[in-house]
Image (spheres, helix red, strand yellow):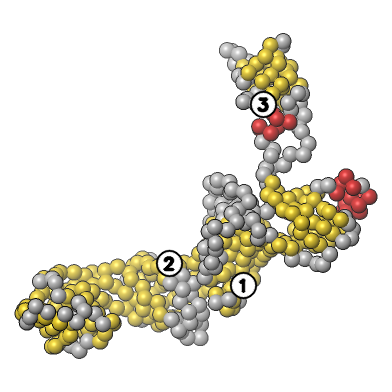
């Protein structure tokens, strides 16, 4: 209330004195509300609501704390009636050493130099020019780019230490009011990653979804309501670019927090996560927090060999099976899973859990399946060889072969063997019936006993 009263008084004073209405600074202290909506492809939507004293007619505002990577053409007012946006520009920070000296041209300054003994000498001077470097009149002589440092006696007015969004608003009446504006900005994004912890029996896992927020805009966002959009939106690379280039950001911080978010809601063929939290996101900061978690999601562990059945190789192996996990996104806790990186940890007999692999996931809707490739299985191996080849004509031939599967584990496993066949191939004989992944990719599922082996034999005809 005190802030609003002071701003209202400033607005009435500006109305009484038109000179005060030429340009007014609107700082973060005037901020009434802030909402960040982050997308996964380096884009953010900022909703900024500030309490601003206005005069009837044109108002020139310099708004600080706005992203330096604001995308030109995206700024829009979202406030009460009676306001119209006339003009916008991104004004750079001008409190720089060069600008200070440029403003001091023609004025008296001091030139401070050091002698051989380490002492300092100060002389009065007049700064004559800054074209091509400083030119000073010192003690009856002209110094061009003199050694030492130049000390100013006064700080020029009207300089700013940070960039500002300059806007020109047309107001229908005097008085302070909330001015809400929204804009798009590059340099803001989020990405999900997942931590999966396998159960001791290997038949289920606990899943945690984490969100990492990234701020590369050069400005802080404090106590912002946070919304996350799962999925990307189309952006025209030929469209308007940021009004100012972002500063180089070196500081990176990381923090974590946990909270209960609302279930995601469908929005324009994407999903919107309302996080129900206010966050601080500093320049260059990466902030990570728990988005949601699920317990005891059923999985299937698969051992898979690809390409051992083909028309070209006479012998292959030994090779290790690819280890894959399959998770069906269903059940009462199921929800959309945004694309990200999933890391899997498995318990051990003694000590902490063991990292067993990671995989990149696609956007997975409810009812969809996640297929995770986690590397190679040490104990499941196979060798393959061709046992026969017969040319039937210039357009057709037959070949036969076998795949020997070995299991060093103490329990039975099911192994998938996927062939890679040319067009026109047809399986004539096989020791285990196959199914088709595609026209040229037969799939055999074979049980391999503990500490034992199984054999797949086949005969295939190829007709061009």
Q: Residues within 10 Å of mark 1 (few under 14, many from 20)?
A: some
Check disc 2 and report its element: helix, strand or loop: strand
Which residue occupies the foreground of this view, 134 or 264? 134
Q: Position of residue 141 (x, y in %)?
A: 68, 11
Q: Is residue 446 left or right of residue 81?
A: left
Q: Which residue is mark 3?
A: 130
Q: Is residue 229 visible?
A: yes
Q: Residue at x 57, y 12 (%)?
A: 116
Q: Quadrant of residue 439?
A: bottom left
**Dots 3 and 2: beta carbons under 8 Å?**
no
Q: Residues within 10 Å of mark 3 (few under 14, many from 20)?
A: some
Cα–Cα gap, marks 3 and 1? 53 Å
Q: Residue at x 67, y 14 (%)?
A: 142
Q: Which is nearer the N-term, disc 3 or disc 1?
A: 3
Q: Residue at x 55, y 75 (%)?
A: 270
Q: Which residue is mark 2?
A: 341
Q: Which is nearer the N-term, disc 2 or disc 1?
A: 1
Q: Which residue is mark 1?
A: 274
Check disc 1 and report its element: helix, strand or loop: strand
């Amino acid at each position: 209330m005190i802030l609003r009263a002071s701003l209202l008084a400033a607005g009435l004073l500006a109305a009484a004195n038109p000179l005060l209405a030429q340009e007014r600074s609107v700082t973060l202290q005037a901020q009434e509300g802030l909402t960040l909506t982050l997308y996964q492809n380096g884009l953010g939507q900022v909703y900024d609501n500030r309490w601003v004293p206005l005069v009837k007619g044109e108002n020139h505002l310099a708004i600080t704390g706005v992203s330096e990577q604001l995308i030109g053409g995206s700024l829009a007012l979202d406030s009460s009636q009676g306001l119209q946006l006339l003009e916008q520009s991104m004004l750079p920070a001008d409190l720089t050493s060069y600008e200070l000296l440029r403003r001091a041209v023609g004025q008296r300054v001091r030139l401070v130099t050091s002698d051989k003994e380490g002492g300092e000498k100060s002389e009065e001077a007049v700064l004559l020019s800054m074209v091509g470097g400083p030119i000073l009149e010192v003690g009856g002589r002209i110094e061009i780019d003199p050694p030492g440092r130049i000390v100013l006696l006064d700080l020029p007015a009207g300089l700013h230490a940070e960039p500002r969004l300059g806007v020109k608003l047309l107001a229908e009446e005097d008085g302070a009011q909330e001015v809400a504006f929204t804009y798009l900005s590059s340099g803001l994004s989020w990405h999900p990653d997942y931590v999966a912890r396998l159960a001791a029996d290997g038949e289920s896992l606990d899943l945690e979804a984490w969100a990492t927020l990234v701020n590369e805009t050069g400005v802080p966002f404090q106590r912002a309501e946070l919304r996350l959009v799962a999925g990307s939106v189309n952006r025209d690379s030929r469209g308007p670019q940021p009004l100012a280039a972002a500063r180089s950001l070196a500081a990176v911080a990381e923090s974590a927090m946990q909270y209960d978010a609302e279930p995601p809601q469908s929005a324009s063929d994407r999903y919107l996560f309302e996080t129900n939290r206010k966050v601080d996101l500093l320049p260059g900061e990466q902030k990570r927090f728990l988005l949601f978690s699920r317990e005891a999601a059923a999985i299937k562990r698969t051992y898979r060999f690809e390409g051992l059945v083909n028309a070209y190789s006479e012998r292959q192996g030994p090779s290790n099976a690819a280890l894959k996990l399959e998770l069906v996104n269903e059940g009462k806790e199921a929800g959309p899973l945004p694309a990200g990186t999933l890391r899997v940890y498995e318990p051990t007999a003694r000590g902490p859990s063991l990292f067993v692999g990671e995989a990149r996931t696609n956007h997975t809707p409810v009812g969809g399946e996640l297929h995770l490739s986690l590397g190679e299985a040490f104990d499941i191996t196979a060798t393959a060889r061709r046992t026969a080849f017969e040319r039937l004509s210039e357009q057709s031939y037959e070949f036969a072969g076998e795949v020997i599967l070995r299991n060093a584990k103490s329990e039975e496993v099911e192994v998938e063997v996927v062939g890679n066949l040319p067009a026109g191939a047809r399986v004539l004989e096989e020791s285990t019936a196959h199914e088709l992944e595609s026209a040229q990719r037969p799939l055999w599922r074979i049980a391999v006993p503990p500490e034992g082996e199984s054999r797949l034999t086949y005969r295939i005809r190829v007709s061009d």
